[in-house]
Amino acid sequence: MEPKREGISVAALHHQQPAFRGLDAGHMACPGCGQALGARLVTEAIGPDAIIANATGCLEVFTSMWPRSSWRVPWIHSLFENAPAVASGIEAALKAQGRQTKVVVMGGDGGTFDIGLQSLSGMLERNHNVLYVCFDNEAYMNTGVQRSSSTPHAAMTTTSPRGETRMGKRHLKKDLLAIIGAHRIPYAATATVAYPSDLRAKVRRGIEIEGAAFLLVHSPCPLGWGHDGADSIEVARLAVQTGFFPIVEMERGVVAGVMKIREVRPVADYLRLQDRFQHLFEDSREAREELQHLQELADHNIEVYGLRADEPHPRDSEGADTVRRGGMRWS
Amino acid sequence: MTTMTRGGFASAASSLEFNTGGWRLARPEHRGRHAPCETSCPAGENPRAYLGAAADGDLRAAWEKLVEANPLPAITGRVCHHPCETGCNRGQYDEPIAIHSIERFLGDRAIEAGWDYPVGAPGGDAPAAAIVGAGPAGLSAAYHLLKRGIKPVLFDAQPAAGGLLRSALPPYRLPRTILDREIERVIAAGIDFRPDKRIGRDISIEELRADYRAVFLAPGAERPRRWSADGAEPARMRYGLDLLKSWTSVGDLPVKGKIAIVGGGNTAIDLARVLKFAGATEVHVITFQALPGAAAVPDAMSAVAREIRQAVEEGVIIHDHRGIRRLIMRGEKLEAVEMVHMREMDDSGRGRRLVAFEGTETILKADEVIPAIGQEVNSAGFESVIGRGPFFHADRFGRLADHAGIFAGGDACGAAGTVSGAIGDGRRAARAIEAYLRGTAPPEQAVIEPIAYRHLNLSYFDHAPRAAAPILSASERSAGNEIESSISQAGVHAEAERCFSCGECMACDNCWTLCPDNSVLKLAGAPPGRDRYVFDYEHCKGCGICAHECPAGFIMMIDEN
Ligand SMILES: Cc1cc2nc3c(=O)[nH]c(=O)nc-3n(C[C@H](O)[C@H](O)[C@H](O)COP(=O)(O)OP(=O)(O)OC[C@H]3O[C@@H](n4cnc5c(N)ncnc54)[C@H](O)[C@@H]3O)c2cc1C
Ligand SMILES: Cc1ncc(C[n+]2csc(CCOP(=O)(O)OP(=O)(O)O)c2C)c(N)n1
Ligand code: SF4
Ligand code: SF4
Ligand code: SF4
Ligand code: SF4
């Protein structure tokens, strides 16, 4: 125990923190897990009066080790494919009771892009007053890193290895946001654990809005992506600064705002930190072409979303995480 | 503890019972490191500490942190060459913190507001020490002895304290009101000042030693170094420092025609500017050193770079890498000087040697040549301790090898030649003197490696322009009016907020916000700073995110294997 907190128990200190945190320590996530951080940041912004429906996946597993739980808000897990349906039912029941409790769904990219997509679509179409948060770690991590439709092109997973004919995943990352947008819901956005203030602001917006809201949170996975746990934030930040993961907001399916990139970095800076892209740095024609392909995809994002900043702005990729003495930045 | 049943719900965060800390291979720890601004300040200030207090809006606390090391901030804020800013990590990002502007502002504010120096009166039975010379070195030693509970008795040959600050530094960069008020305040803090007492004339050093167990010698370097060109000297040669001193005491200097000043130090530059203000037609400065550039030049002129720049703006002509080979006389009268390309070169391991390059001679018309090539100690009265001279040979704490109880510092020791250096000498000597008087362990020199730029996480800072002090244009300047003025209080705050807080917690909340395991916890009521955060080692998995994302480089991962 450190001398400066002598006499205070760890549990007591956890409950004396100046901000409400709906997800606490003792969970079983890997060291440096982006999703564990992301989920906690989301709970900070929703507050204690909330019910979470969690799809199957790492988050569900690592927070609920029988007979304990890391959650400090009511939380339910049913199946992989039906979390939005469960949430829809909860929301309808609360509505019938005239209660204001917020309903939030959390799921991985496997649960969102693939397995739960039809029940998510139904929830959005019926415009339930629910916020859906997808923690996008770009593969099925909990079962040992299988590709999902969110896995980026050319990334290696156990089911999209670098083989004799393919340089990692053959297909492209599904443009889920366009599908969500096609439901014309009031609010949809992307965010990342590297910019916590932006993330929390978007959660608050999604909660405030009457009707369905969707948030895609880029969440580095040291195990599946093969980067050092200490670099999780760095990796997530580079995904934004390279244009690889665009940070955007949509109202009724129309892009309403983006986080501009002040200093656009080459995608290689992002890829180099991760084992899943190491084969792109081999000395071969295929590697060079696929590396360039990823650069072109990032450039395409920058182009279609208009990500390049004309002038510095406090909420662009450089300004949005500026810290101040005394921690005012994050509060 | 709520027990779990099938279909039941968990009590809040019951997972706290799982001690995931056991997974850890390395633990994060708070490890304060010295900032380069501190390690490069000759006076030993810790700018980071007072910038932090200034950013928090507590100017008095900021001043108190500042005068921990330097009792003369209103003065150094104006005249120091501020190597702290050269060392400042922010210089590698955009522009260094304007540390001197904040130092000056705090010094001035303390004078205006009459804040007391944070020193108490020494007890009745406290030991006493004698200090010879009330320049910055002597004043600093006296102040730091006082802070250490020792009675300082300060002797000076002159009627007023200040040394060269008073006798030579021109008021256009050190106004007399500031000088007088700051020095008066330091003395009033509890220094027993004895003016008009020249050691070697009014009191001998032996008498002094009989009365005081410890003596600090800081008589500066009063005697001009002799100069001649090929053995030739004009009949009535006037030396630079003498001229400058008579100008500061009389306020006027008879001057006419074209002047050639030899030397590249502060005396040469200040004299050149004073002569220019006084109406000399042309003023030339001839030096074998180089003009300072944007990047560090190894043989740069020793004068403060800012002052050289301003002198050039005012019309002073500098001939760098030049020396005087010959004086061209018509009888008694100087006609011209013969200049030659000249540089200091490495003498194959035997130090440095001045080399003049044949065939590069040029003629410069001049009515007077004034040497300003440096001073040495006026050793009259100090013969028994100065050895072979012309400077005292002291270690970093001012100790003289064969003279226990005698200490020396400042210009009298040759090396530093700056106000902040003299202040640092006085400060360190006070430590050694205290140890000597109280019989405690003598201080030892420690080599401190400051935190490097690459150990900061710069993602968390944004570019912001450096505070610029208002400055008179060359045509508005005169010898008696201060050229540079202060930045505003708002400017001080903005500037202090630019500080990266290298190596010390700035309470930014990054570690607390970004730990995926909620294992950085805040303590309620703790002031903004390192005491606000603790690690929960029962749950911390040692991922290293907090260390990587700490903007200030204050967290280090320590191997636990
Ligand atoms: C023209 C000029 C401009 C300068 N500009 C700058 C500048 O911009 N920035 C900077 O950092 N430095 C500058 N310097 C250098 C700086 O002034 C000196 O390095 C500094 O003053 C040295 O301090 P000191 O206490 O060692 O000696 P001094 O300031 O020389 O003080 C010595 C004191 O000892 C007294 N004394 C001498 N002999 C005796 C004795 N026998 N008995 C009793 N008292 C005695 C003297 O009267 C004097 O008061 C400048 C110097 C000059 C000459
Ligand atoms: C219907 C169904 N199919 C498969 C599984 C096995 N399974 C459990 S977790 C998981 C992976 C989840 O991946 P994702 O949704 O991306 O979340 P992550 O673990 O990556 O956070 C799988 C396939 C299951 N529990 N239910
Ligand atoms: S004394 Fe000089 S070097 Fe030290 S902090 Fe002040 S200006 Fe900087
Ligand atoms: S940024 Fe601040 S702490 Fe770092 S060197 Fe500069 S003044 Fe010192
Ligand atoms: S971020 Fe948290 S878990 Fe990771 S090393 Fe720091 S305190 Fe430990
Ligand atoms: S991250 Fe910020 S709050 Fe944490 S130790 Fe570093 S400076 Fe202090």
Image (cartoon, coloured by chain):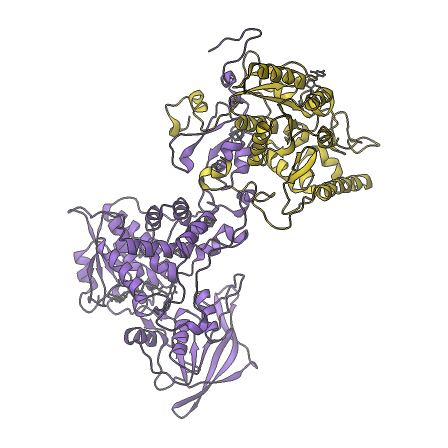
Chain colours: A yellow, B purple
**Count of numbered labels shown in the rendering:** 0
| Position of residue A6 measured from the top left corner of the image (x, y, whole percent) | 37, 25
In this view, the residue in front, B20 or A110, is: A110
| Position of residue A60 measured from the top left corner of the image (x, y, whole percent) | 62, 19
| Position of residue B305 measured from the top left corner of the image (x, y, whole percent) | 46, 65
Q: Residue reaching furthest bottom?
A: B331
Q: Residue at x 68, y 41 (%)?
A: A243
Q: Residue reaching furthest top?
A: B5
Q: Residue reaching furthest right?
A: A165
Answer yes or no: is residue B404 visible: no
Q: Residue reaching furthest left?
A: B124
Quarter residue A199 falls in: top right
Q: Is residue A267 above or below residue B255?
A: above
| Position of residue A64 measured from the top left corner of the image (x, y, whole percent) | 58, 16
Q: Is residue B219 above or below residue B440?
A: below
In this view, the residue in front, A162 or B410, is: A162
For residue A198, side relative to residue B62 (left or right): right
Quarter residue A126 falls in: top right
Quarter residue A232 falls in: top right
For residue A74, side relative to residue A264 (left or right): left
In this view, the residue in front, B256 or A95, is: A95
Answer yes or no: is residue A187 visible: yes
Q: Quadrant of ligand 2?
A: top right
Q: Is residue B293 above or below residue B538?
A: below
